[in-house]
């Protein structure tokens, strides 16, 4: 299924039913009086999360949604039927914005969570409502109110505990394959990953976390180079970032320069994301002689003045992956404990 993480839709809530103008006309009952009933309320438009969805692709084919109108009132004090609510299914992690007003209406992150985005119009009143001791046969009614209409911008932000970022061909998709059951595309050319991918890392029977892989960044991504930074927002919900670095880039670039370039694009995109806890993961250690690995690692850490965790592994062979996943799981559990306190 095609991955789509943005959509623009219009929603129209139902109109309220008009009030009824009616008088009771029955044999042997003179001056029956007013008996016009109220209309029904218009239906609301409600977004509901569906755990079975993972993309907004359905909104590429249907962009307009309209809730049913309320039915008008009838004689004999009969109230019109209310319009049923229209429920629109969206994936978990959907943010909802009013595109015209430029405001956020909310976000949906829990299963079966509901968000009313357009309220139905109120019902009109029938003439029976306006009877009084001095006006026994009013001819006054009120029309139903129109429902709200909105243009909504939906943005999907994947729900993951850990996010992978780095230059193209740093080995992010290979690592995702190595530690999860996901099968992202892997090839020996840049930008094989064109959309975010998710996988579940199972450390033990009852200990696991979700990891997200996004397309690679290059210098100038904030200005639109490569695939730009549009996918960086998918890391906004991640509590921990793993910055993958290719120890032997095909173009002979300096790994330290690549780390700085990605960090600069991260800061350009969001100060909050740039301040997120980030671990350095030096990939493709199988291309470095065993006796030189520690020296290479220490030299890169020293050049970057890196004061956080730094790991060395080989995603293609799996060497070092288990230790990394165990430490990530322990760190996430520590963050959970801190949040509980």
Image: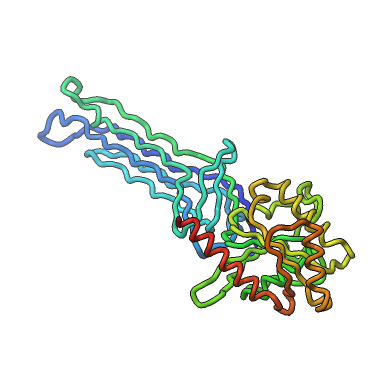
- Which quarter shows the N terminus? bottom right
Residue nearer the viewer, 14 or 259: 259
Residue nearer the viewer, 303 or 313: 303
Q: How is the image coloured?
A: rainbow
Image spot of residue 339 (x, y percent): 49, 56
Image spot of residue 209 (x, y percent): 56, 67
Residue located 68% across and 59% down the image:
308
- Which quarter shows the C terminus? bottom left
Residue located 18% across and 34% down the image:
25
Image spot of residue 268 (x, y percent): 73, 46
| Residue 79 visible somewhere in the drawing | yes
Residue located 58% across and 47% down the image:
9
In the image, taking residue 278 as reference, residue 83 lies left or right, namely left
Residue nearer the viewer, 278 or 109: 278
| Residue 195 visible somewhere in the drawing | no
Residue lying farthest right? 252
In the image, taking residue 132 as reference, residue 283 lies left or right, namely right
């Amino acid at each position: 299924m095609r991955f789509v993480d943005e959509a623009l839709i219009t929603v129209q809530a139902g109109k309220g039913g008009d009030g009824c103008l009616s008088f009771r006309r029955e044999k042997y009952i003179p001056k029956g009086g007013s008996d016009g009933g109220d209309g029904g309320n218009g239906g609301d438009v409600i977004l509901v999360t569906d755990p079975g969805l993972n993309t907004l692709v359905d909104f590429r084919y249907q962009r307009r949604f309209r809730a049913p109108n309320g039915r008008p009132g009838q004689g004999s004090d009969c109230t019109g039927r209310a319009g049923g609510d229209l429920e629109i299914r969206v994936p978990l992690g959907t943010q909802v914005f009013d595109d015209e007003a430029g405001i956020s209406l909310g976000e949906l992150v829990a299963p079966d969570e509901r968000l009313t985005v357009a309220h139905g119009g109120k019902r009109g009143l029938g003439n029976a409502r306006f009877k009084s001791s001095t006006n026994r046969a009013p001819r006054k009614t009120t029309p139903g109110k129109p429902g709200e209409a909105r243009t909504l911008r939906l943005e999907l932000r994947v729900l993951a505990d850990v996010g992978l970022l780095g230059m193209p061909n740093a080995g992010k998709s290979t690592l995702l394959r190595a530690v999860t059951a996901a099968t992202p595309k892997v090839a020996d050319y840049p930008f094989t990953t064109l959309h975010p991918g998710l996988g579940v890392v199972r450390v033990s029977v009852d200990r696991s976390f979700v990891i997200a892989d996004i397309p690679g960044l290059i210098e100038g991504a904030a200005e639109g180079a490569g695939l730009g930074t549009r996918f960086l927002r998918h890391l906004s919900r991640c509590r921990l970032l793993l910055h993958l670095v290719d120890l032997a880039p095909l173009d002979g670039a300096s790994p330290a320069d690549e780390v700085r370039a990605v960090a600069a694009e991260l800061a350009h995109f969001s100060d909050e994301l740039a301040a997120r806890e980030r671990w350095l993961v030096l990939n493709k250690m199988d291309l470095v002689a065993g006796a030189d690995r520690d020296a290479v690692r220490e030299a890169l850490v020293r050049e970057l003045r890196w004061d956080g965790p730094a790991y060395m592994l080989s995603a293609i062979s799996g060497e070092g992956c288990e230790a990394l996943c165990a430490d990530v799981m322990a760190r996430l559990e520590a963050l959970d404990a801190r949040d509980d306190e």
